Structure formats: structure tokens, C-alpha cells
């Protein structure tokens, strides 16, 4: 089996694609720019190569770096596929005219409507749920069943949450704009600010730790950060997980907010046919298991089975708002955060 070639993306390399272009001589290959950095993705590329004979070359960097690089490379870019996380970042790539529209019966059949860009410019292949975490000794789960409840005055001084420049929070607020309109979304943001236990700081795991330590009683974080703590080799991490309770919000209404790990074919891709085949492979049962479980995400294809902690949660309702709306409403979400004083 050909060995997948993997490159890091230094900041100084933004101006040229020569490192990957020099590897682009073979006909049966695929050049992937990826903002995902999980070991399971290595298995994903190897499985695609084994199935198709197409060698995968991977260039890794963060999303903004990759988007900037693709802009600078233009038509000369060797990139065939870009993979990133969060609809907001996929939307940024879309705004820079990076993605080509793809029409695929396989993707249309395998992926739910809300995980597909309306024009086929990108597709979601894993699902990330933004969950509420509580200290069950201080807060009854029946009292906080929705995102809207985070702004309830009864929880003044009790909420730990990340800053407004975090893309996860921006996408959640973008979903509230879609469901409630800008005015109500802004009132919600102001209410959450009033309920801060402390100024926003840290990452998602820090918010969960804040609940476990008693710094706050309620936090917001993506579900997989919690599962990492549950499955950690570190006893202290597992104790954190044991001291909090996860709540999947809005089960009596629209369902829990869902974001994506997604990918699209780069406009002008030199190996366009291979790129489409790769996206279709990502929707296969084999790839879905690898793509999702490496980071404890939910598969995008709902028939694919899960295991461990995720399987123990059983079925719950997920918001079927098309994830492209999260990107479209991102600029307004950022403005609302600023007006609400959410730093």
C-alpha cells in the first residue's frame, strides 16, 4: 500500500504550493488540505488508498491558514479537497470562492439534507453537539432544558462559557438568529452575559472543569470534550466527568444544536474525479466509523452504529437546521456578541 505523505503547514509557506505540487506527478493521487489533526484520519486515508489505489497527500494547518493559502495559490493550487471543522469555517471558505459545486447521488442519498450545502459546495461528515453541562448537586436538569434557559435570570452568576471569538459559540448564536430572529438572539446573548460566573476564558474542557470544581454550576461545551474526559487515562479527568451531568438541550422543541466536520472539492482541483470519489468514500459506513469515532463525534450517516459513551446516550433529537445557515448568520452573530458585551 502506498504510504500517505503528510506535511505540516508553516506560516512561512503560505505563498507557495511547491512542496505539495512537487509530489503531484502521479495520476492516481489526491491532495488534501486538512484542518483536522486526529490519528484516526491516517487510518481514513489509508483505507481510501487500499480501496481505490489512489495515494493521498495531506497538508495540515489551521482553517484560516489553509483558506489563506488557497487564496494565494489560486488556479495554481495542487489542492483537491479541503477538510475543516465547523460550518462557520466552511462558510469562510465558501465566501473566498474556494469550493466547487458537486452533484453526487451517493452523497445525496447517504447524508441528511441538513448536512449538505444547498449547492453542493461542501458536505458534513461528522456531527458535533453543543451540550449543556451542570453540577447535579446544585442544578436540577429539569430546570435547564434549552439553550434559551442559559439566559434565565435564576442562573445569574452561574454560567461558564468561552469567549465570543470562539467559532462554536458563534455558530450556536447563528442558529438562534435563524430560529428566533436577530432581536431575540441579542436579548439571549445579553441574558447569558448577565449570568456569567466569570469572564469568558479557556477552551471547552475548561468550562466542564469549571463546573466540576465549583467555579460555576452550568457550562456549554461540545459533547466530545466530555467523552475525552470519560475515556481519559488520567484519574483526575475521569473524576471531572463523574462530577458533571450532560444535558442535550431543546428536546421538546427543535433539538440540540449540531455542527459539522466537513469537506468540499476545491475549485479547479487537478484531480477532481478522485476528489469526488473521496467525498463519497467519507460517506461510507467504514469511513463514517473512522471519521467520527476518532474524536468521539456522531456519524453524519445516521444508520452507522456508535459505541461506548455515545451509544449509551441512545437516540435524541438534533436540530435539522441546514448547517449552511450557521455560516450565513455568522457575521450577524459576531455583531450581536459585540453589542451584548460578550468578550
Image (cartoon, rainbow, N blue to C red):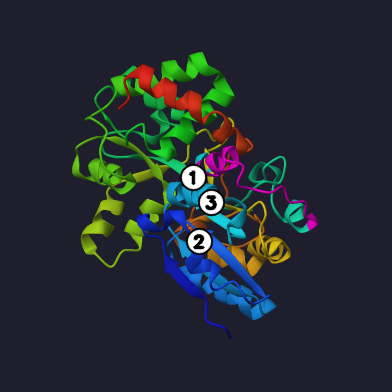
**Of marks 2 and 3, which one's residue comes earlier in the chain?**
2
320 shown above or below 152: below
Provide residue 37's location: percent of width, then percent of height.
Answer: 42, 62
Residue beneath disc 3:
70
Left or right position of 83 against 28 = left
The numbered dot on residue 129 is 1
Query: Where, quadrant-wise, is the C terminus in this rendering?
Result: top left
Q: Quadrant of residue 255?
A: top right
Return the disc, 1 or 2, that comes first in the chain's sequence.
Answer: 2
Question: Image quadrant of residue 30?
Answer: bottom right
Gap between marks 1 and 2 measured at Cα: 35 Å
Residue under the point 44% across and 33% down: 170
Q: Which mark is residue 17?
A: 2
Left or right, residue 242 beside residue 67: left
**For the residue labelled by badge 1, is the local secondary structure a helix, a strand or a loop?**
strand
Callout 1 touching callout 2 (CB < 8 Å): no
Q: Earlier in the sequence, mark 1 or mark 3?
A: 3
What residue sits 56% from the left and 63% below the top? 32
Query: Residue 311, position in %: x, y?
Result: 52, 59
| Near-viewer residue (76 or 310) | 76
Whether tag 1 and tag 3 are in contact, CB under 8 A, the answer is no
215 in magenta: no
Rate crowding at label 1 as few (under 14), some (14 to 19) or many (20 or more) other CA atoms within 10 Å.
many
Question: Which is nearer the eye, 209 or 79?
Answer: 79
Q: CA distance from mark 1 to mark 3?
A: 29 Å
Q: Secondary structure at mark 3?
A: helix
Question: Which quarter of the figure is the N terminus placed in?
Answer: bottom right
Q: Position of residue 175 (x, y in %)?
A: 53, 30
Based on the picture, tell me whether residue 95 belongs to the magenta stretch. Answer: yes
From which residue to which does the magenta span run? Answer: 89-105
Amino acid at each position: 500500500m502506498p504510504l500517505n505523505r503528510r506535511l505540516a503547514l508553516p506560516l512561512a509557506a503560505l505563498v507557495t504550493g511547491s512542496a505539495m505540487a512537487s509530489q503531484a506527478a502521479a495520476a492516481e493521487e489526491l491532495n488534501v488540505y486538512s484542518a483536522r489533526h486526529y490519528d484516526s484520519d491516517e487510518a481514513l486515508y489509508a483505507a481510501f488508498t487500499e480501496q481505490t489505489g489512489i495515494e493521498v497527500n495531506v497538508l495540515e494547518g489551521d482553517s484560516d491558514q489553509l483558506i489563506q493559502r488557497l487564496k494565494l495559490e489560486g488556479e495554481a493550487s495542487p489542492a483537491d479537497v479541503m477538510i475543516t471543522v465547523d460550518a462557520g469555517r466552511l462558510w469562510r471558505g465558501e465566501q473566498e470562492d474556494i469550493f466547487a459545486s458537486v452533484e453526487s447521488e451517493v452523497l445525496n442519498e447517504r447524508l441528511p439534507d441538513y448536512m449538505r450545502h444547498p449547492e453542493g459546495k461542501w458536505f458534513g461528515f461528522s456531527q458535533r453537539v453543543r451540550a449543556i453541562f451542570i453540577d447535579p448537586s446544585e442544578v436540577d436538569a429539569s430546570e435547564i432544558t434549552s439553550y434559551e434557559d442559559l439566559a434565565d435570570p435564576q442562573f445569574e452568576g452561574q454560567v461558564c462559557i468561552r469567549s465570543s471569538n470562539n467559532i462554536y459559540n458563534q455558530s450556536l448564536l447563528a442558529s438562534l438568529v435563524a430560529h428566533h430572529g436577530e432581536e431575540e438572539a441579542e436579548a439571549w446573548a445579553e441574558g447569558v452575559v448577565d449570568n456569567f460566573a466569570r469572564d469568558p476564558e479557556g477552551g471547552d474542557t475548561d468550562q466542564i472543569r469549571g463546573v466540576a470544581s465549583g467555579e460555576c454550576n452550568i457550562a456549554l461545551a461540545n459533547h466530545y470534550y466530555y467523552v475525552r474526559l470519560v475515556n481519559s487515562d488520567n484519574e483526575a479527568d475521569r473524576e471531572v466527568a463523574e462530577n458533571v451531568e450532560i444535558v442535550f438541550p431543546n428536546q421538546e422543541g427543535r433539538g440540540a444544536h449540531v455542527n459539522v466536520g466537513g469537506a468540499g472539492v476545491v475549485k479547479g482541483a487537478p484531480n477532481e474525479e478522485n476528489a469526488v470519489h473521496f467525498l463519497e468514500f467519507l460517506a461510507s459506513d467504514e469511513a463514517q466509523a473512522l471519521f467520527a469515532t476518532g474524536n468521539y463525534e456522531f456519524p453524519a450517516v445516521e444508520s452507522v452504529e456508535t459505541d461506548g459513551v455515545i451509544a449509551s446516550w441512545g437516540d435524541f433529537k438534533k436540530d435539522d437546521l441546514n448547517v449552511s445557515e450557521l455560516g450565513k448568520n455568522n457575521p450577524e452573530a459576531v455583531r450581536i456578541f459585540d453589542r451584548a458585551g460578550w468578550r
